[in-house]
Image (cartoon, rainbow, N blue to C red):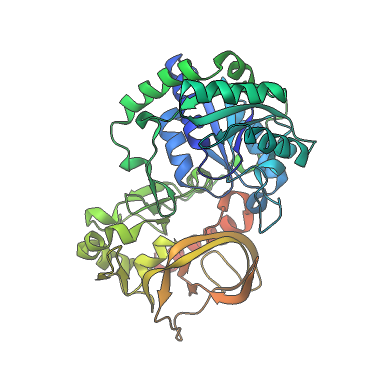
């Protein structure tokens, strides 16, 4: 019943193995549902592009155990095959704990684990590494090992002898070759739109999977979950007589989003329409709300700054309709962005700050709201995730713009964060709307009440 693709550490080849398996299944005309552990946006983009089916995030911290189980059983049961790609190393969770880790999720879903190991520089030491992972938590079922970056035929023979000595099954040996290189950026893998000649790569990956992986074993390990109880609460449709379209920014600068957000809006009387800020276009006139997800605006700062029609439209829109902007989306609302070369480019000028490159901020955050925004009421408590390298400078607040909430997280001091008023919610924090019913309820009321006031 499906499996989890995990690793001994980040950058070991989890996504590479996932793409090989999807490509192979695609080559034999089988459907596959993929899942990703944690609050990742970039890996799921690649899994989605190759499988032609939206990858679903399974996050025990953001969404909770019940939601994760329902999502896995519902969507996983709709295809021929299914699997979960892990996050970081198998046991890596919040801080020094395993809370929210791939290991915890594998136990919650009762799934076997396929461990991919970067074999560079390893021989007999592989034995100690694998035995350590098996002994660390004996409740886990490590079904087999895939070795990545195997250097030569001699190297492969040594590694397979080591696995045989400790009675661990080998599920494949991947060579170190150019066809298996995945480009990366400062927050992880490169966005899928930067991958050139994807269809050719998919055919090549399918061929590599057949040659270097134990396909017969994977046919059993990837079988989709079959359950009688595939009910999923968030999919319930709310009947609505009125329709309130929501524009969502979606281009090469803004693309960090969960599939479920769009589905949730559309099931609650808010059909989504696309706005592409980089194309220098006005926000669609029928929109009654706007969502600007995260992304890489710093890589497109010059083009965004020159998109004066987009910026002017945004400035007008935020004075009339509810606007939700997270992470990179928030940066668009500021005074300016310093690009990757350190050059400053004016932005919409709606919020009082500038954004420039800083140190990495990453981790789950507990947020307690101090003010009302389009998605929060005073005292609301939400769990979100922060992940960015750009930072805010020259920040200020005034009578029209207030901080949203206090943030708490592992190894950080409690701090005020975000910008808000009745029509604007802008924050570094990424939220998972579909597993937090209060978010869509508050947003829906904001959109409806505001639309009635201006009609």
- Residue at x 46%, y 86% (from the top left corner): 399
Q: Nearer the viewer, residue 370 or 392?
A: 392
Q: Quadrant of residue 130?
A: top right
167 w.r.t. 306: above or below:
above
* Residue extending farthest right: 138
Side of 153 where 411 appears, left or right: right
Please determine whether, in this image, residue 433 is positioned above or below residue 304.
Answer: above
Residue 161 screen position, x and y as percent: 63, 21
Q: Give 289 or 371, whichever is nearer the viewer.
A: 371
The residue positioned farthest toward the bottom in the image shown: 399
- Residue 382 location (% of width, % of height): 63, 62
**Residue at 51% across, 31% down:** 148
Does residue 186 appear anywhere in the picture? yes
Say how many tags the image has. Answer: 0
Q: Is residue 289 above or below residue 68?
A: below
Residue 371 at least partly seen: no
Front-lying residue, 231 or 127:
127
Give the residue drawn at x 26%, y 58%.
282
Q: Quadrant of the N terminus?
A: top right
Q: Percent from the top left, x then y, of residue 373?
A: 52, 70
Asked if residue 364 lies left or right of residue 309, the reply is right
The C terminus - image quarter: bottom left
> In front: 107, or 312?
107
Q: Is residue 7 left or right of residue 205?
A: right
Image spot of residue 63 (x, y percent): 65, 50
């Amino acid at each position: 019943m499906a499996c989890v693709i995990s690793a001994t550490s980040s950058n070991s080849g989890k996504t590479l193995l996932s793409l090989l398996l999807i490509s192979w299944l695609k080559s034999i005309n089988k459907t596959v549902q993929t899942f990703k552990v944690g609050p990742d946006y970039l890996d799921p983009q690649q899994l989605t592009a190759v499988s032609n089916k939206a990858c679903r995030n399974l996050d025990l911290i953001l969404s909770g155990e019940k939601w994760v189980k329902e999502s896995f059983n519902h969507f996983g049961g709709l295809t021929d095959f299914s699997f979960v790609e892990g996050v970081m190393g198998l046991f890596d969770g919040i801080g020094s704990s395993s809370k929210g880790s791939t290991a915890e999720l594998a136990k919650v879903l009762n799934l076997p684990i396929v461990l991919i190991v970067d074999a560079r520089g390893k021989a007999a030491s592989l034995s100690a590494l694998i035995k350590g992972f098996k002994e660390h938590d004996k409740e886990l079922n490590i079904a087999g090992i895939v070795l990545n970056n195997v250097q030569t035929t001699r190297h492969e023979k040594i590694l397979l002898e080591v696995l045989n000595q400790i009675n661990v099954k080998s599920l494949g040996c991947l060579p170190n070759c150019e066809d298996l290189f995945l480009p990366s950026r400062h927050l992880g893998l490169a966005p899928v739109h930067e991958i050139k000649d994807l269809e050719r790569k998919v055919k090549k990956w399918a061929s590599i999977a057949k040659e270097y992986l134990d396909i017969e074993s994977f046919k059993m390990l990837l079988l989709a979950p079959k359950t009688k109880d595939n009910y999923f609460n968030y999919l319930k449709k709310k009947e609505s007589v009125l329709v309130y379209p929501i524009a969502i920014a979606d281009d090469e600068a803004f693309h960090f989003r969960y599939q479920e957000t769009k589905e949730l809006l559309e099931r609650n009387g808010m059909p989504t329409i696309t706005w592409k800020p980089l194309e220098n276009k006005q926000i669609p006139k029928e929109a009654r709300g706007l969502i600007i997800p995260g992304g890489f605006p710093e890589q497109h700062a010059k083009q965004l700054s020159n998109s004066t029609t987009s910026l002017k439209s945004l400035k007008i829109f935020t004075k009339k309709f509810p606007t939700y902007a997270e992470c990179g989306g928030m940066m668009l609302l500021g005074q300016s962005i310093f690009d990757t070369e350190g050059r400053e480019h004016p932005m919409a000028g709606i919020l009082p700050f500038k954004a420039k490159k800083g140190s990495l901020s990453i981790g789950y955050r507990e947020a307690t709201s101090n003010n009302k925004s389009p998605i929060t009421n005073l005292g609301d408590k939400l769990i979100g995730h922060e992940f960015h390298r750009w930072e805010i400078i020259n920040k200020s607040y005034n009578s029209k713009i207030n901080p949203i909430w206090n943030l708490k997280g592992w190894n950080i001091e409690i701090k005020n964060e975000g910008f808000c008023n009745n029509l604007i919610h802008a924050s570094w924090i990424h939220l998972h709307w579909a597993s937090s019913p209060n978010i869509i309820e508050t947003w829906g009321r904001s959109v409806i009440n505001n639309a009635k006031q201006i009609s």
